[in-house]
Image (cartoon, coloured by chain):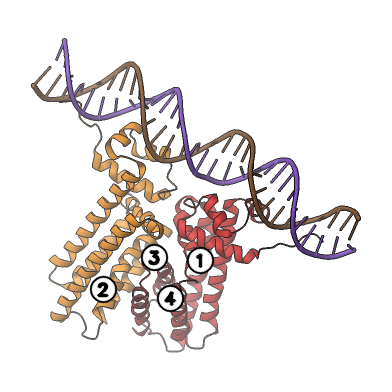
Chain colours: A orange, B red, C brown, D purple
Amino acid sequence: MGRNKEFDTKLVLHKAMEVFGHYGYEGTSLKQLLDGLGIARQSLYDTYGTKRDLFISALKHYVTAKSDDVISYLTTSNSVKQGISDVFYEGASVLKDENRRKECFILYSAFDRMPHDTEVAEFLTKDLKRLEDVFYETLVRGQKQGEINQRQELRAFARYLNYSRHSMTQLAKITNDPKVLDDYVKVTLSNLDN
Amino acid sequence: MGRNKEFDTKLVLHKAMEVFGHYGYEGTSLKQLLDGLGIARQSLYDTYGTKRDLFISALKHYVTAKSDDVISYLTTSNSVKQGISDVFYEGASVLKDENRRKECFILYSAFDRMPHDTEVAEFLTKDLKRLEDVFYETLVRGQKQGEINQRQELRAFARYLNYSRHSMTQLAKITNDPKVLDDYVKVTLSNLDN
DNA sequence: ACGTTTCTTGACCGTTTAGTCCGAATAAGG
DNA sequence: CCTTATTCGGACTAAACGGTCAAGAAACGT
């Protein structure tokens, strides 16, 4: 009963990631947001709530989906090196794709807010910790399987990989030169052979 | 003749870095800015011009000073490995110092603006390129001196070091856990021995 | 003492902001 | 046909925005 929603709410959420990623949260005016989403002012408030509500929704949707992907790569691959390598090459390939890269930058806007926005900070910190642990467990498995050198300090290495992955998004935001990304991934992964 | 300036203009510039770094450029209201600087509204406009003028001044002052430091480390040290190591450890130590770290985050705010602010983008791109070249030349010298493995692709490595250095600032913005920074530097520098 | 410069304060400007309200049109199901 | 739910667009509000202007006080050099 009643009229159906005409727009795909998930699709609009992805458009929101792009707009927020491009201008930043504060830098995005309601007008720019509406233009980017392609929906009417009232539809936004009816469906998502305030500008901030929409930002939080878009952020959570983005982060959890990405992290789930990463965890899937790390836990399903038999070879630990292969799994980690897949994570970075997949990440880089998204960031090199002119269409798919845009929405990633909502993460940058979110990081930007961490120092003065506790809700965003708590959410991101939790996700960061969750991923670091998965990296760590994966490296432990790698040592057991003989893929990872016994000399490696795994907690330090897990932290390095975890934060390096996020650095890629930030790198991509400040350069759209694909070579930079390629070089960054290549050198980062070369650490796996130490 | 006439009354002297009561505030140290350089010091205020540093405070501006901190405020912009904390809230971001758009996120900083004039009121927050004035409170942070500790000067009167009119003094700001008389001395620095508009909010944007102040931001640009603070950014350029920060970036050129930092880059000059890095270049000095890289070019004056006899040992190439030592020079690069110094750059990263010095950078990390600033970011671990509760007082000195704050102003670094103006760089983050500036990166944030790159996609839609050509003036900022051009300035940062130029500085990024300038530093990459110095890293490259330093690595070339390192190969000549036998410090750097001949197998290394120096351009890729230079890019990696250059962007990794900036990643440290971004890392510090999203965590104030000093361990993260330490681990990141340690693993990054381990690449020098490959 | 006398300009000159800066500092501080508060009022003021036009614009933009996020968010609300309302009315008319448009679909869907019963 | 009628009810329900959604869409769109314009009008509207109150607050905040960046920026300007004016006036008086305070500190300097001559």
Quadrant housing residue A156: bottom left
Asked whether disc 4 touches disc 3, contact meaning CB atoms under 8 Å apart, the reply is no
The amino acid type, in three-letter code, at marker 1 is: Glu
What's the CA distance linking mark 1 and mark 3? Answer: 27 Å
* Tag 4 residue: B92
Q: Residues within 10 Å of mark 4 (few under 14, many from 20)?
A: many
Q: Is residue C16 above or below residue B71?
A: above
- The residue where tag 1 is placed is B103
Q: CA distance from mark 2 to mark 4?
A: 19 Å
Residue corresponding to mark 3: A180
Residue sitting at 23 percent across and 59 percent down? Answer: A67
Q: Nearer the viewer, mark 4 or mark 3?
A: 4
Give SS at disc 1: helix
Whether residue A96 is visible: no
- The disc labelled 3 sits on which kind of residue? Val
Residue A174 lies, in percent from the top left, at 43, 59
Percent coordinates x, y for residue D23 in the rendering = 75, 43
Chain letter of the residue beneath label 4 in the structure image: B
Q: Residue at x 57, y 52 (%)?
A: B52
Image position of B90 (left or right of A64)? right
Q: Secondary structure at mark 4?
A: helix
Q: Position of residue A92 (x, y in %)?
A: 30, 61
The three-letter amino acid code for the residue at tag 2 is Ala
Mark 3 or 2: the one toward you: 2
